[in-house]
Image (tube, grey):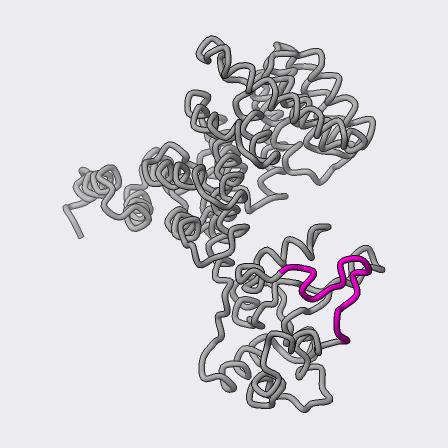
Amino acid sequence: LDEDYVWGSFLQSKMYQAGVSCSDCHDPHRAALRLPGEQVCYKCHRKDRYASRQHHFHDEDKAGASCIECHMPATTFMGVDRRHDHGFRVPRPDLTLSLGVPNACNRCHPDKSVEWARNRVEAWYGHQPRGLQRFAQALQSGRQGRRGSLRALLELAGDASQPAIARATALELLADVRSPGVLKQLRQALAAEAPLLRLGALKALASAPLEMRILAFSLVWDERKAVRTEAARLMAAYPREQLEPAQGRVLDKAIGEYIQTQEFNGERPEAQVNLGNLYLDLQQFTRAETAYHKALRLQPRFVPAYLNLAQMLADRGRESEAAELLREGIRQVPDSADLHHALGLSLVRQKQTAEALPELGRAAELDRDNIRFTYVYAVALDSQGNTDEALTVLARGLEHHPGNVELLRLLVAYSRKKGDTEQALLHARRLRKALPGNPEAEALVRGLEYEPGRGGSD
C-alpha cells in the first residue's frame, strides 16, 4: 500500500509472467485504456466464459459481475488518488481470516463477516480458490520469525512458478545466510536470469559477514544498474588489498554510480542515509556524519538517520553523544520502538542497565513482532536479578511467536535457573519439536528427563 502500488502489484500478476505489458491495456502516451471499461479485458479473455453467472455468481448489473471490482479492487491514496490493484488477484477471504489482508468480497459487502465471504466463495466453487499468488503465508511467517519460516522462505525463493518480486522478498527475509541451505539458494539467485532475484540475494548478503560478501563481487559488472550498484555497496567495506588492481577500478566505478544515484535523490533523507552508510564502510567518517546530519535537517523525524548516526558515534567512542542523539530522536518520534531499543542498548554499554530497562521494555511493548526486542529485554531483566519477570516477558513473546527457537532456549535456561525442571522440560520439548532431528535439542530433553529429582522419563 505504498507509492509503488500499481507497478509492484503488476509484477506479482499472472499477466506479467505471461508477457503482458502496460501498453497492451493502456495507450502509452495518454495512459487511458485502449478500450472502455472491461472491454479491454476481453481482448485476451473469453467473454462468454468470464462474463457469465457461472463464473462470477452475481447479477449482471452488480459490482460482483465486474472483472475490475473483483480482480482489481481500488485503494485511495493520500485521500485523493484512487488506484486499482494490478495484481489481478483471485479474491481470498480465507487469507483475510488467517493473515488480515483485505479481500474484494468484503469491500463490496462491508456489512457481512469475513466468514460469510469465505463460506460463500467455497459454496460457489466447491473449494477455496488459490490463484497464482501463493506466497503470503511464507512472507508473513518470515517477517514474524515463526517456526518453519526458514523452510517456507527457501521453498518460495526456489519456486519458479511464483512471481520474481515475491521470491526476491523471500530472499531478503533469509536471516541465517551462513547455513548451507540458505547459502545454496543465494548462490543460485545471484546467477538467476531475473534481475529482481539477483537484487534480492544481494540484499540478503547485507547481513552476512564481510568475508562472505565476496560472493557479490561478480555482480559489480551486472548489466542492470540497480544490481551492480547494490553489489558495489556491499563490497565497499571489503579490504582492497585482497582485490586485484583491475578489480578495484571496476568496483570504484560502480561505487561512483551508486553515489551519483543517491545524490540525484539527495533531497530525500533516505538518500543521505544511504550515502552515510556508504561513507562509513569506506571509513570516511566525517563525510558519513555530514550525510546523516543532512538527513535529519531534511526530515527531523527520520528514524534511520538517528539510529545509524548513533551507532557510528558509539563505535567511534562517543557513546554519550549517541545516547543524547537517541533521546532527541525519541522526543521527535516518541513511539519508535527502534529508538527506544537503541537507547536502551546505549545505556547498557554505559553500564546503566537499570536505566536501560524501561527503554528496552518500551521497545518490546511497541513492536511485539520484533523478536529481538523481546529477547534483549528478557536478558537485561535477568541480568538485574529479575528472572521471574524475564520468564513472563518470554512467555508473552512466545504467545506472539509460537515455536520461536531463540525464545524457547531462553525459557529453558531461565526455568532451570529458577529450579523449575518441569517447566524447563516443557519448553525443551517444544524446542525439540521446532528443531526436528537437532542433536542439541534432543540432548537437552534427555538431560532434563533424567535430571535428579524427576524420577525418570515420562
Asked whether residue 374 is in view, the answer is yes
Asked whether residue 385 is in view, the answer is no
Rendered view: 117 above or below 193: below
Q: In this view, which residue lies farthest toward the left?
A: 456
Q: Quadrant of residue 283?
A: top right
Magenta span: chief secondary structure: loop
Rendered view: 84 above or below 148: below
Q: Quadrant of residue 223?
A: top right
Provide residue 290's location: percent of width, then percent of height: 75, 17
Region in magenta: 21-36
Say whether residue 342 is magenta: no
Rendered view: 359 above or below 80: above
Q: Identify which residue, 129 or 411, lies in the foreground.
A: 129
Residue at 33% in and 48% down:
434
How many marks overall? Answer: 0
Q: Quadrant of residue 412?
A: top left
Residue at 18% in and 53% down:
458
Provide residue 6's location: percent of width, then percent of height: 69, 57
Q: Quadrant of the N terminus?
A: bottom right
Provide residue 299's location: percent of width, then percent of height: 80, 32
Q: In this view, which residue lies farthest toward the right?
A: 80
Residue at 62% in and 11% down:
316
Residue at 53% in and 39% down:
199
170 relative position to 296: left or right: left
77 relative position to 125: left or right: right
Provide residue 438's location: percent of width, then percent of height: 25, 42
Rendered view: 49 above or below 291: below
Say whether residue 24 is magenta: yes
Q: Identify which residue, 435 or 283, lies in the foreground.
A: 283
